Image (cartoon, rainbow, N blue to C red):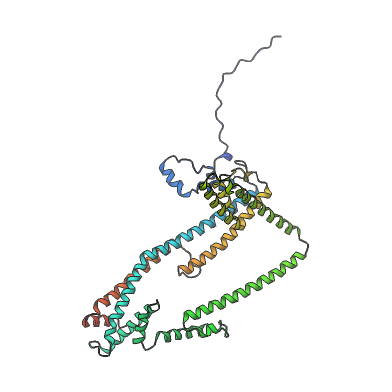
């Protein structure tokens, strides 16, 4: 029996399969160094890019599974902690930028106006003084009283900024000396703080000015705060001692193991850097200096348990293995997440401290938000207020040289 063959089918090139949406490239998979299609695209993408080294470290941390595969719980936790660390670092950098921008603007725009105002105030006080002498003629008693009040106010403001000549001028024409005024203000403040100040605090009771009293009160508060902190630490130490005497619970053992894993991961990365950056590996003096600088930064990052900084230094030292963290076990992923969680907690404390420092430096109320737009408006308002005050003082200085003009100016400022 003869076998009959089927006729051959013509060859057709297979059509490409539709792309699997699970494997679509995400923004984090795009190469940060790739050239954009045109200048418009570059303008839109560039502000959002990290540095090449930081982007590579981020990609290595985020690529926990194969492309498109669902992330494990450990990898998801790592991504959350990574985002939190980066967000807190960005907030710290933004706060520093906004605060320094305001201080720089104040120095450039307000400080010259303040100096002009100081010189005008000093000139006006000196111009008013001759009109208050016993043999001076030309002013009524009411006008002399206004001139005396204005002179003493100007001289006091300048004396409080350290102008000793103005302090002497004030005491010459004022019914109360500056020391008497300061003591009266300190007594009034001491009365308001009587329920809070310690009665046996000699420095607070002897303070002769509000600044001295506030300084004594601040030291008293710091001493009380330190004593309370010491008591809390002593109680905590007792609790820890009692806890150590008991047999550790399974949860405590797991926590201890997690801490050990986190520390081991950090130490391993640090030791790799220390080995690779040894000065004996340098080929020339320039390379030795570069490696020394990197090692100094690695020591600082290890001291503050900054995992991302160590990864960045590893990339700078050209040691990075982009797939290293992808191969980590769930236990190691949890250890890395713990390091990032500790770093985020430290950054959160730092952010709160920086918030308070900038509120004090910028003379803002407690709880205020450090906002660039708000500080910009504040700078403009301060500039306008200084200009108004400067124009008023300069107008008085122009008219203080002759009786008719001075009388008119004093009458306008009698209230």
Nearer-the-camera pick, 129 or 74: 129
Task: Quarter of the image for the C terminus: give it.
Answer: bottom left
Q: Judge left or right: residue 163 versus residue 86.
A: left
Which percent across, then down, holds residue 65?
62, 43
Q: How many marks?
A: 0
Give the vertical position of 148 relative to 315 (above or below). Answer: below
Percent position of residue 242, x then y: 75, 68
Q: In percent of the image, x 44 and y 62: which residue is there?
A: 100
In the rendered image, the quadrant that contains the N terminus is top right
Q: Residue furthest top?
A: 1
Q: Is residue 320 above or below residue 256?
A: above
Q: Let me know if residue 277 appears in the view.
A: no
Residue 190 appears in view: yes
Vertical placement of residue 173 versus 83, above or below:
below
Q: Position of residue 176 (x, y in %)?
A: 39, 88
Q: Is residue 67 left or right of residue 117?
A: right
| Nearer-the-camera pick, 273 or 312 | 273
* Image point (59%, 76%), residue name: 223
Q: Give the camera-side residue of 290 and 157.
A: 290
The answer to whether 23 is drawn above or below residue 222 in the figure is above
Q: Residue furthest right?
A: 247
Front one among 220 and 35: 220
Residue 380: x and y, percent?
Answer: 37, 65
Answer with left or right where residue 297 lies relative to residue 161. Answer: right
Q: Residue 159 occupies which quadrant of the picture?
A: bottom left
Query: Residue at 72% across / 66% down in the picture?
Result: 240
């Amino acid at each position: 029996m003869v076998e009959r063959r089927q006729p051959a089918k013509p060859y057709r090139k297979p059509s490409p399969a539709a792309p699997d949406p699970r494997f679509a490239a995400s923004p984090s998979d795009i190469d940060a160094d790739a050239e954009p299609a045109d200048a418009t695209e570059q303008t839109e993408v560039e502000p959002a890019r990290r540095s090449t080294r930081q982007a590579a470290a981020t990609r290595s941390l985020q690529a926990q599974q194969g492309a498109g595969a669902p992330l494990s719980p450990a990898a998801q936790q790592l991504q959350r902690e990574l985002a939190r660390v980066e967000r807190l670092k960005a907030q710290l950098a933004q706060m520093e930028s906004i605060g320094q921008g305001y201080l720089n603007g104040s120095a450039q725009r307000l400080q010259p106006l303040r100096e002009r105002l100081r010189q005008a105030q000093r000139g006006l006080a000196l111009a008013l003084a001759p009109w208050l002498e016993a043999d001076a003629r030309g002013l009524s008693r009411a006008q002399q009283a206004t001139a005396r009040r204005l002179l003493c106010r100007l001289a006091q403001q300048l004396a409080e900024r350290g102008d000793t000549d103005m302090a002497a001028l004030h005491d010459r024409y004022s019914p109360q000396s500056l020391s008497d005024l300061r003591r009266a203000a300190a007594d009034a403040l001491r009365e308001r703080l009587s329920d809070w100040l310690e009665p046996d605090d000699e420095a607070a009771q002897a303070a002769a000015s509000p600044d001295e009293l506030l300084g004594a009160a601040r030291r008293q508060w710091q001493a009380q705060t330190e004593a309370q902190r010491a008591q809390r630490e002593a109680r905590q130490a007792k609790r820890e001692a009692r806890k150590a005497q008991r047999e550790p619970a399974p949860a405590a053992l797991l926590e201890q193991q997690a801490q050990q894993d986190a520390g081991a991961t950090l130490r391993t990365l640090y030791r790799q850097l220390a080995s690779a950056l040894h000065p004996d590996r340098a080929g020339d003096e320039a390379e030795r200096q570069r490696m020394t600088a990197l090692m100094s930064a690695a020591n600082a990052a290890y001291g503050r348990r900054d995992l991302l900084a160590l990864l960045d230094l590893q990339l700078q030292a050209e040691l990075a293995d982009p797939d290293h963290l992808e191969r980590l076990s769930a236990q190691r992923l949890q250890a890395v997440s713990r390091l990032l969680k500790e770093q985020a907690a430290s950054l959160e404390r730092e952010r709160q401290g920086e918030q308070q420092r900038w509120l004090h430096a910028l003379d803002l109320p407690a709880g205020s938000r450090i906002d660039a737009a708000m500080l910009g408006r504040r700078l403009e308002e301060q500039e306008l207020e200084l200009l108004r005050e400067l124009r008023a003082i300069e107008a008085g200085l122009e008219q203080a040289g002759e009786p008719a003009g001075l009388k008119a100016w004093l009458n306008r400022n009698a209230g």
